């Protein structure tokens, strides 16, 4: 009986044990560790077969890989498990998701393991990596690029590196054009911007021509191979319109003081000088009356009125320049003007009065002259004015005494403003009206509460945000660090930084150098959140040249690789039409990403075919000549025989 009970309880224990083990082996599926074991139904649950995990290694495969980009480790596994791998019996690395792993050239064996409470499973694969380091190459870059004066250049092109290595770009010369000099890494194709700030007249004028050609060399390197491209950037000069200084409302009396109106109109023109240059033409017209006076070739108005001329006169003064002597042929198509003369006009009013009376501000907004605001608030102000002489006063707006806005031609003037982020404290906003002689004004006291600026932008007047865009010139010639410190060119802190860099490069005091460059923000944000470094360590030599076996800067440019590029001859590349740098053909094979064309069999080459045709024709001609000679010889023999 006891034996029966023992068998029964043993059977129950065995069933419970099997049930526990089966439930513990429920299939769990994970992204990146996909479980492919075939589940079975047990009490409504999907469970796996009891035992160690089922492991399949999908990638890498037993084959040759021709890339040094990271390889994908892909597998499937079933069961509650831990998975890890090692490469060439190296460090074990536990896997939590899909992963890529780095390799080097040669033969490798990858070992993959998975285990659970019931055991361990392993797989391995041997593969070979045959890496050909590929040179970076430029995509299509226009040989001619155009930009108009008063505009900024923004031209994009691609650079491709099949190995995804760290690339360094260089543009020679710089100023006014620059490259986006961010170092690239890991990308097969990277888009680069060739850009400028606003092109000025000096950038677009050369030897009397209305354009200037900038010959630019663009270089890229992965520190082993390089590519070079060339482009001409033509900056087209535009005719800038004359700028007339504000004339403003004017008042003159018919007697007593201020009884003569005398004013020279101020003009500036980028191409033709100012009002006294003699290159500008002036014209005056009266919009609501007949002519009272003229204007000279130098912009002078001189008028003494009488009592019969009392009133308000609306006057227009116009100035024209001479245009560009030799404009670029494409100026109209590319820049929207033809370079011919431009006329600028400005209206103003002249009040003639027997006795001048001051204008008055009659109402204003806000009515509260003491305000508390946040720096980012948008503020609105207006004033209404009256002049008993019928003049429409001009209005001038100031912030803390600094001129901001000029309004004319209306008896109601408005002003909006925001101090922007990063601005706080007591401020004053002032409105002032004038008839040219007498004034009236009012002022608001503003208490500005500061609002912090985002890290990447800086606040500006009027609430504008400014995004920095730093550009740098070329690195200057390498100078000895010790002598630079003695000359006061380096601060103590900068000196210590350079020394640390030299130590990392194994340069002693004699070879430790420093080079500097000028950097500025073309957007003029007046901040330095993303300012580029202005100095770096360098290998010092007393006379840098193109044959000193040092990568350095000299003669107005920096070498791209050792003794080539920049101020030296171009580095070998996959676009120089020369078979070099281990290429299997001209600019193909080896480090170049393009395969060389298969050589045609000898008889399929067109030049060989032509040669064979020529030789055949020559042989046919020779044979014909021989046959003719034989025939002639036989005829000659027959003739002799007949005579005999």
Image (cartoon, rainbow, N blue to C red):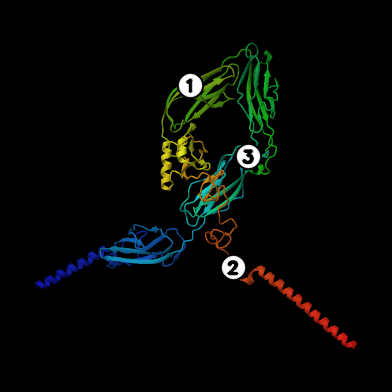
Question: Which residue position holds label 1?
Answer: 443
Q: Is residue 346 above or below residue 50?
A: above
Q: Which mark is residue 204?
A: 3
For the residues carrying marks 2 and 1, which lies nearer the camera in this image? 2
Q: Residues within 10 Å of mark 1 (few under 14, many from 20)?
A: some
Count how many numbered circles sit on residues in the image: 3
Q: Seen from this angle, which residue lies furthest left? A: 1
Pointer 2 or 1: first along the chain? 1
Residue drawn at x 12%, y 73% is 4
Q: Are marks 3 and 2 in contact (CB under 8 Å)?
A: no
Q: Residues within 10 Å of mark 3 (few under 14, many from 20)?
A: many
Pointer 1 or 3: first along the chain? 3
Helix, strand, or loop for circle 3?
loop
Residue 446 placement: quadrant = top left
For the residues carrying marks 1 and 3, which lies nearer the camera in this image? 3
Q: Which mark is residue 599?
A: 2
Left or right: 492 as drawn, with respect to 148: left
Residue 527 versus residue 136: which sits nearer the camera? 136
Q: Seen from this angle, which residue lies furthest top? A: 256
Q: Is residue 194 above or below residue 131?
A: above
Residue 298 versus residue 428: which sits nearer the camera? 298
Helix, strand, or loop for circle 2?
loop
Q: CA distance from mark 3 to mark 2?
A: 50 Å
Q: Quadrant of the C terminus?
A: bottom right
Q: CA distance from mark 2 to mark 1?
A: 87 Å
Residue 26 in sight here: no
Q: Are marks 1 and 3 in contact (CB under 8 Å)?
A: no
Q: Which mark is residue 460?
A: none
Q: Position of residue 574 (x, y in %)?
A: 56, 57
Residue 241 in sight here: yes
Helix, strand, or loop for circle 1?
strand
Pointer 3 or 2: first along the chain? 3
């Amino acid at each position: 009986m006891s034996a029966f009970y023992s068998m029964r309880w043993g059977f129950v224990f065995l069933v419970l044990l099997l049930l526990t083990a089966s439930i513990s082996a429920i299939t769990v599926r994970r992204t990146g560790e996909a479980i492919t074991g075939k589940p079975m139904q047990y009490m409504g649950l999907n469970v796996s077969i009891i035992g160690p995990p089922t492991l399949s290694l999908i990638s890498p495969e037993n084959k040759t890989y021709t890339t040094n980009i990271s390889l994908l480790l892909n597998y499937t596994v079933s069961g509650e498990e831990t998975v890890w791998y090692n490469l060439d019996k190296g460090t074990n690395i536990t896997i939590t998701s899909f992963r890529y792993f780095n390799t080097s050239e040669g033969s490798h064996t990858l070992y993959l393991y998975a285990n659970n409470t019931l055991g361990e499973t392993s797989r391995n694969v041997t593969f070979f990596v045959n890496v050909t380091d590929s040179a970076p190459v430029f995509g299509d870059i226009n040989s001619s690029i155009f930009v108009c004066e008063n505009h900024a250049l923004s031209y994009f092109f691609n650079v491709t590196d099949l190995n995804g290595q760290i690339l360094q770009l260089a543009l020679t010369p710089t100023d006014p054009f620059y490259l986006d000099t961010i170092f690239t890494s890991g990308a097969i194709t990277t888009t680069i911007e060739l850009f400028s700030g606003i092109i000025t007249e000096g950038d677009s004028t050369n030897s009397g021509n209305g354009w200037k050609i900038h010959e630019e060399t663009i270089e890229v390197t992965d520190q082993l191979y390089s590519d070079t491209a060339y482009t001409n950037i033509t900056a087209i000069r535009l005719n800038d319109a004359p700028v007339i200084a504000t004339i403003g409302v004017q008042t003159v009396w018919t007697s007593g003081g201020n009884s003569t109106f005398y004013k020279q109109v101020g003009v500036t023109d980028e191409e033709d000088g100012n009002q006294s240059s003699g290159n500008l033409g002036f014209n005056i017209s009266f919009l609501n009356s007949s002519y009272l006076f003229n204007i000279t070739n130098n912009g002078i108005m001189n008028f003494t009125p009488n009592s019969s001329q009392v009133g308000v006169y609306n006057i227009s003064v116009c100035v024209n320049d001479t245009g560009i002597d030799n404009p670029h042929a494409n100026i109209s198509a590319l820049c929207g003007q033809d370079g011919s003369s431009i006329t600028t006009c400005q209206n103003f009013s002249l009040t003639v009065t027997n006795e001048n009376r001051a204008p008055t501000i009659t109402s204003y907004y806000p009515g509260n002259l003491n305000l508390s605001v946040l720096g980012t608030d948008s503020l609105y102000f207006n004033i209404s004015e009256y002049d008993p002489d019928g003049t429409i006063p001009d209005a001038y707006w100031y912030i803390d005494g600094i001129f901001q806005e000029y309004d004319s031609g209306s008896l109601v003037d408005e002003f909006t403003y925001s101090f922007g982020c990063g601005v706080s404290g007591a401020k004053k906003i002032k409105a002032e009206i004038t008839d040219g002689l007498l004034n009236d004004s009012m002022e608001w006291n503003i208490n500005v509460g500061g609002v912090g600026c985002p890290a990447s932008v800086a606040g500006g007047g009027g609430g504008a945000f400014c995004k920095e865009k730093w550009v740098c010139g070329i690195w200057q010639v390498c100078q000895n660090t010790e002598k630079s410190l003695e000359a006061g060119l380096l601060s103590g802190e900068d000196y210590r930084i350079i020394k640390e860099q030299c130590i990392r490069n194994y340069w002693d005091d004699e070879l430790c150098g420093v080079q500097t460059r000028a950097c500025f923000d073309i957007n003029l944000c007046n901040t330095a959140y993303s300012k580029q470094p202005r100095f770096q360590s360098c290998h010092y030599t007393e006379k840098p040249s193109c044959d000193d076996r040092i990568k350095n800067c000299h003669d107005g440019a920096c070498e791209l690789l050792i003794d080539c590029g920049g101020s030296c001859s171009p580095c070998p590349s996959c676009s120089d039409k020369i078979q070099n740098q281990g290429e299997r053909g001209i600019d193909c094979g080896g480090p170049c990403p393009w395969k060389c064309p298969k050589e045609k069999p000898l008889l399929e080459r067109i030049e060989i075919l032509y040669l064979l045709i020529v030789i055949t024709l020559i042989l046919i001609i020779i044979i014909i000549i021989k046959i003719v000679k034989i025939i002639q010889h036989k005829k000659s023999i027959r003739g002799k025989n007949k005579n005999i």
